[in-house]
Image (spheres, grey):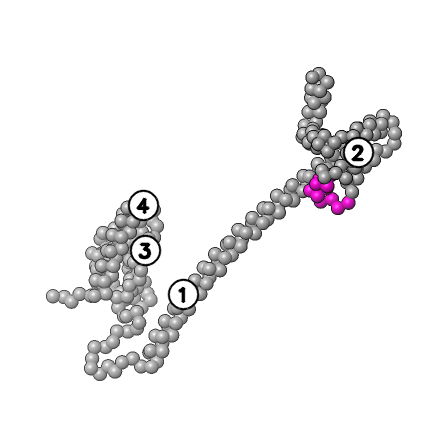
Amino acid sequence: MAKGNPKLDYMVDTVRGMVRTIAAQTGGELIFSALLYKSGRKLNSIELADAHAFSKLVRQYVKSEMPDKVRVELRTQGDNVQRWMKQFELGESPLGPALPNNENFLGLGEAEIGELVSKRFEELERQRELERAHQELAEMRLRHEELEREAEDLSAQLEAKNQMEHLLRILSIAFPGLARMLKGTPIGEFLGQLAGAEGELEAPRPSGGGEDGETVAAVASMVRGLSEKEAAVLYLLLLEVEKDRSALQRVLDFITKG
């Protein structure tokens, strides 16, 4: 009876177990790829075959190609997403060449042992570097999201400030006396803070006399006699009129005809 290959049998049993486990988790059919290598050189391999035929196909390829390493990948057939991957050593041991089976073998020398230890430490260091890189990437992504949120908040604050400054300029031009009247009130202080004003809310004075100057003076005199609540209502009314100038005539018609 031909002697079996324990490493090959172990690989077949391991893959079969994973096929059953993943199939139970996903509920779908699985396919596999088996990449064969020998001394670092890629050999003929199996690509995207039915997972149920793994044992038969792999044994045939191993017998034909005589690889020392086989990397097995399992994927779900429907979406071709990789679910599992493992590399198996079929030739030399992962820790070095197999020990000769003779009485004259005295064990590995100091140089061979040192080389094996050095390789193992290099593998561990690469793994630690990869973990650190993943952690730094995650931290950078979180910081980037925080900066984006801060930028959005600052942009919204700047937009609100610009809009308020624009509205205050419109209000000062339309009713020069209103800006001075609101200066000493809580409403005036609040509007000054929103607009970023550090000095007085001074409006331009009408130049010259005539009918326009008299009209502005009359309006300013009327505004000075308003209470804070009435001034606030007038301010909101002016904001709506600024959006639609035709609303001013409709308001007048409503008051006079009502």
Looking at the rendered structure, the kind of residue marked 2 is Gly
**Separation of disc 3 and disc 2 at Cα?**
78 Å
Of circles 3 and 2, the one toward us is 2
Report if residue 196 lies within the magenta region: yes
Q: Is residue 132 left or right of residue 89?
A: right
- Provide the residue span drawn in magenta: 188-199
Question: What's the residue type where badge 1 is placed?
Answer: Gln
Q: Earlier in the sequence, mark 1 or mark 3?
A: 3
Q: Which residue is mark 1?
A: 127
Q: Nearer the viewer, residue 222 or 97?
A: 222
Q: Is residue 242 visible?
A: no
Give SS at disc 1: helix
Q: Nearer the viewer, mark 4 or mark 3?
A: 3
Residue under the image location 56 percent in, 48 percent down: 149
At label 3, which amino acid type do we have? Trp
User: Which mark, residue 78?
Assistant: 4
Do the residues under discs 2 and 1 have CB atoms within 8 angstroms? no
As drawn, the label of residue 27 is: none
Residue 222 colored magenta? Answer: no
The residue indicated by pointer 3 is 84
Quickly name the residue at label 2.
177
Q: CA distance from mark 2 to mark 1?
A: 74 Å
Residue shown at 23% from the left, 52% from the top: 52
- Mark closest to the chain's N terminus, 1 or 4: 4
